[in-house]
Amino acid sequence: MSEIAACTLIQEEPDRKTERYMMMFKDYPDVVSVDILQEMLGICRKNAYLLVKQNKIHSARVGRSYKIVPYFEPLHYTLQDMEQHPKYIQDFYQHELDRGLTANTVIHYHANIRKCLQYAFQIGMIRSNPADRVERPRKEKFKSEIYSGEELEQLFKAIQGDPSEFGVIMAAFYGLRRSEVVGLKWDAIDFENKKISIQHTVVTAKVNGTLTEIARDKTKTKSSCRTLPLIPACEQMLNKMKKEQEQNRKVCGKSYCTDYLDYIYVDPMGKRIRPDFLSQHFPDFLVAHQMKRIRFHDLRHSCASLLYANGVSLKEIQEWLGHSDISTTSNIYTHLDFSSKVSSANAIVNIFPENTKV
């Protein structure tokens, strides 16, 4: 979410209010999502969105302004000074980088500074935007992490009984996307022929400004629609989930949600698990259990890497993961663990006269 939270609900003097907020929220990030806002204010997600929508919480004061203003305030630069000397802005960027901030964070600072100066330009306070004449840092390329076989084994043991257990196992073993895990329906499971079909998805999107879940009877691409073998462990887990759902429906009676009876991944009250639950809850689970932090989607990458490390061809991995382009699959080379790379090196060394293994 891009909403930046700033409380304006308490009526106090500006200086006192600023000081109070800085103390209250000093342990939180500069820019917070609606999810973190829930934690900060102790409210539910629906109310957090409502506060943002009603403009009772907005982007005025809490956040990056507390990092930008303290730098410039003692320097007493005017808007005209900034316009004539864009280097002043460039110096700030370098100062923040020297402090150890990432380039991506400074890029966010640049966006905020440019937006403010653009407003000054639009109302005629300056004749040009000096932020357009500075060089912003280059965005750092994201590098994902993967889990090794040993780390996945540890994860599977720790995740037992957790609400995300089903999603984690399906993503790690079958390489399913988040939308595919949540979109799984009972009619996609062929218990008799031991097959599982990936043909339904549930995605989150903004519709008329409101975050909405959209269920589709189709996958991301035509290649994503695939049929995979139903292994005994997953079959056992699915049978257990089916019995639990039937039991929960009996216990809850009319309180049980009947809108998602055809879906596999539902909570004890019958409500379908939200796609963003997996991506939000999974990192928190890893932190709580002191495990290496990866994204939920990185379980899919881990699956690809383990398949390749065990001799599965790229073409077969492409079909397993449902990639439409094999070049996407080939990117698993960047995720391989070191032992796999050593094996690859030894295979190459074998063609040379001096056969020296790594």
Image: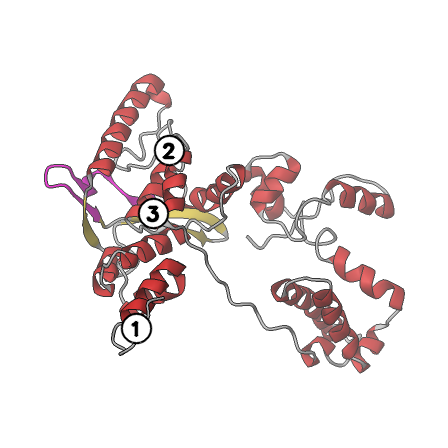
At mark 2, the secondary structure is loop
Which amino acid type is shown beneath numbered disc 1?
Answer: Val
Residue at 38% in and 22% down: 255
Residue at 72% in and 51% down: 62
At mark 1, the secondary structure is helix
Point out residue 48 in the picture as x, y percentages from the top left corner.
59, 41
**196 within the magenta span:** yes
- The residue stretch that appears in magenta: 182-197
Quarter of image, res 47 = top right
Earlier in the chain: of badge 1 and badge 3, it is: 3
Point out residue 154 in the picture as x, y percentages from the top left corner.
40, 40
183 sits to left or right of 278:
left
Quarter of image, res 103 = bottom right
Residue annotated with mark 3? 172
Earlier in the chain: of badge 3 and badge 2, it is: 3
In the image shown, does 143 or 24 lie closer to the viewer? 143
Task: Give the CA distance from mark 1 to mark 3.
Answer: 32 Å
Q: Note whether residue 202 is visible.
A: no
